[in-house]
Image (tube, helix red, strand yellow):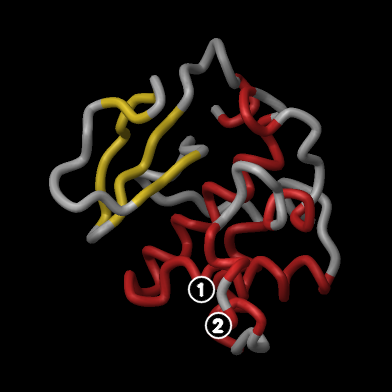
Amino acid sequence: MGVIAYTEADVKLLARLLRAEAEGEGNLGMLMVGNVGVNRVLGNCLDFKDITSIRQMVFQNPGGFEATQKGYFYQAARSNELNLARRVLKGERQHPASNALWFFRPGGDCPAQWYNQWNSGRFKSHCFYIPTESDCPSVY
């Protein structure tokens, strides 16, 4: 049982996203990308209203993930990423992505705010951004 409904196809899709977005950040970085994805499905708020599935989250347009536009995303998921995807779907959370809905890779320091959302921290190259609890209570 997961924190959101999912199928084995969703596990594979999320695993591909984790690798394509954050393979260079290691397992912890990939888990954090997964946290952001799951939060977008849980949230039903802000930019992610009516996003109710892994598939909708991964392919959201506009506002989705750049990795879906690259060939690397379309390669089959490997066992490591599949295991990481399952961990996230079962509710494992990693700070600073625990409540995050966004992340990006700046050229320098993490801005305190990004599109009016507060920075919750940085992991390696990625900065994570959280909504306020009043704007998006479902991710808290």
Q: Are marks 2 and 1 in contact (CB under 8 Å)?
A: yes
The vertical placement of 71 against 114, above or below, is below
The vertical placement of 134 against 108, above or below, is above
**Residue 52 spot, x, y in % from top left:** 81, 41
Query: In whole angstroms, how far apart are the C-alphas of marks 2 and 1?
Result: 6 Å
Nearer to us of marks 2 and 1 is 2
User: Position of 130 compared to 85: left or right?
Assistant: left
Tag 1 secondary structure: helix
How dense is the environment of label 2, judged by Cα within 10 Å: few (below 14), some, or many (20 and up)?
Answer: some
| Amino acid type of the residue tagged 1 in the rendering | Ala
Q: Nearer the viewer, residue 78 or 117?
A: 117
User: Position of 9 compared to 124: left or right?
Assistant: right
The vertical placement of 97 against 28, above or below, is above
**Residue 6 spot, x, y in % from top left:** 82, 59
What's the residue at 82%, 73% (across, down)? 8
Instruction: Tell me the number on the disc at residue 111.
Output: none
Furthest-top residue in this view: 134
Tag 2 secondary structure: helix
Instruction: Tell me the quarter of the picture where residue 114 sits.
Output: top left
What's the residue at 53%, 60% (across, down)? 66
Q: Nearer the viewer, residue 60 or 123?
A: 60
**Residue 55 spot, x, y in % from top left:** 78, 57
- What residue does disc 1 label? 20
Q: Quadrant of the C terminus?
A: top right
- What residue does disc 2 label? 72
| Amino acid type of the residue tagged 2 in the rendering | Tyr
What's the residue at 44%, 55% (across, down)? 32
Q: Quadrant of the N terminus?
A: bottom right
